[in-house]
């Protein structure tokens, strides 16, 4: 069955890599994730936004994931490590429902609340979750972009002075922080970036000074990085070449994620890279083969393309390959 995130995050912390937190909302996407973890022998945290839960249907999710554990074994992974996690939970009630449905981990995101209220809400989720051996991720700081149910144009970095208080008073198992990442495919405006000699936009670096200060305060505590899609420029180009209109879509450079993974960051959340990859595959397919209408043909191509992106992230960026 599914496992909570305790062991996977503590090993990642010790061995200096990050476990992927991959969102899913449809079958081909999650098949691609499972194929990728089988081929790379990586642990994985499968995560569901509230909107994903509504899209799929709440009762279907735990059954899909039970099936996925068997699917992974069938593909040759003897002991898969798969967590089922609620991403950006907004209420105690939603967290409780997910835990009752069989989620092994939940995030309660009270980062928009005043500090004391965030502590209170997060602690109420921890009190419930820990009774069922379910791990809890909290959040401090504001991450730019659409965060599940809320939106902010700009980031406010996590205040390192707050982290000890938050973690000790809530008892949460991991902490999401804001150090300059953002949700979605437009993480930076062109104005925020510099141009390199080839005219490619280079985004500003993450606030590693803030991460390092948090790491000093909370020695040996798992940190989570949201909004970490790399926004592969070949996918953006393909989308735009075949009729799409994504202007200046910019992600987090792989080198920045790799650097964070070697520090206290133990879980890196990626959703948009997979959305972009599927869109690029299907746009290209229909432009080239307009007479095809069997979804198995084009969805299989999209699935293979997503698998390659996941494998690349696992093996070359996060470092979680061969960590089972
Ligand atoms: O809150 C996290 C979501 O995964 C954001 O998704 O920004 O890729 O639409 P998106
Ligand atoms: P991206 O939009 O960068 O993929 O972020 C995903 C995320 O943080 C999910 O919580
Ligand atoms: Zn997020
Ligand atoms: Na790490």
Image (cartoon, grey):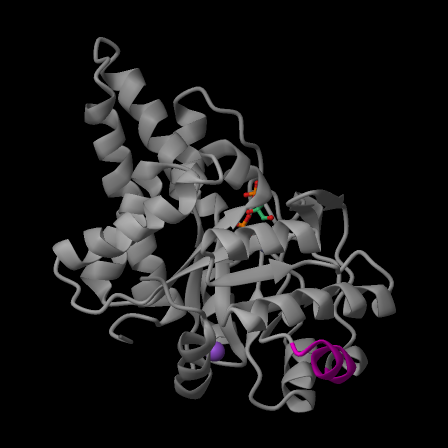
| Residue 274 image point, x, y percent | 41, 44
Which one is in front, 170 or 180?
170
| Residue 222 image point, x, y percent | 55, 78
Q: Is residue 76 above or below residue 300?
A: below
Q: Which quadrant would residue 155 be assigned to in this image?
A: bottom right
Is residue 74 rendered to the left or right of residue 285? Answer: left
| Residue 154 image point, x, y percent | 77, 52
Q: Is residue 206 visible?
A: no
| Residue 122 image point, x, y percent | 71, 66
Q: Which residues are magenta?
A: 164-171
Q: Residue at x 44, y 38 (%)?
A: 276
Q: Residue at x 46, y 77 (%)?
A: 6
Q: Please identify the quadrant where the C terminus is shown.
A: bottom left
Q: Is residue 293 above or below residue 280?
A: above
Furthest toward the top, the residue is 291
Q: Please identify the quadrant where the N terminus is shown.
A: bottom left
Q: Residue at x 66, y 79 (%)?
A: 171
Which one is in front, 226 or 61?
61
Q: Is residue 312 magenta?
A: no
Q: Residue at x 24, y 74 (%)?
A: 322
Q: Main secondary structure of the magenta part?
A: helix
Q: How many marks?
A: 0
Which one is in front, 101 or 302?
101
Which one is in front, 77 or 256?
77
Q: Is residue 55 above or below residue 114?
A: above
Q: Is residue 130 visible?
A: yes
């Amino acid at each position: 069955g599914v496992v909570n995130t305790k062991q996977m995050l503590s090993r990642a912390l010790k061995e200096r890599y990050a476990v992927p937190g991959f969102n899913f909302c449809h079958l081909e996407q999650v098949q691609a994730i499972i194929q990728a973890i089988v081929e790379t022998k990586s642990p994985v945290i499968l995560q569901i936004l509230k909107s994903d839960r509504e899209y799929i249907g709440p009762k279907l999710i735990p059954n899909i994931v039970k099936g996925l554990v068997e699917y992974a074994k069938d593909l040759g992974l003897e002991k898969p490590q798969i967590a089922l996690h609620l991403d950006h939970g907004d209420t105690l009630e939603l967290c409780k429902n997910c835990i009752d449905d069989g989620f092994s981990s939940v995030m309660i995101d009270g980062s928009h609340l005043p500090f004391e209220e965030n502590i209170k809400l997060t602690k109420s989720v921890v009190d419930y979750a820990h009774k069922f051996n379910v791990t809890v991720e909290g959040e401090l700081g504001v991450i730019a972009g659409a965060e599940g149910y809320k939106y902010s144009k700009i980031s406010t970095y996590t205040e390192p002075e707050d982290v000890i208080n938050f973690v000790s008073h809530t008892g949460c198992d991991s902490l999401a922080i804001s150090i300059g990442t953002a949700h979605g495919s437009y993480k930076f405006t062109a104005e925020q970036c510099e141009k390199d000699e080839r005219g490619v936009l280079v985004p500003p670096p993450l606030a590693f000074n803030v991460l390092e200060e948090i790491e000093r305060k909370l020695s040996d505590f798992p940190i989570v990085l949201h909004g970490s899609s790399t926004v592969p420029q070949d996918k953006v180009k393909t989308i735009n070449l075949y009729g799409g209109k994504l202007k200046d879509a910019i992600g987090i450079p792989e080198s920045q994620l790799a650097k964070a993974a070697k520090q206290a960051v133990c879980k890196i959340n990626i959703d948009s890279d997979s959305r972009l990859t599927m869109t690029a595959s299907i746009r290209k397919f229909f432009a080239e083969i307009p007479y095809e209408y069997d979804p198995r043909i084009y969805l299989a191509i999209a699935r293979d393309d997503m698998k390659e992106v996941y494998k690349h992230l696992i093996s070359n960026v996060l470092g979680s390959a061969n960590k089972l």
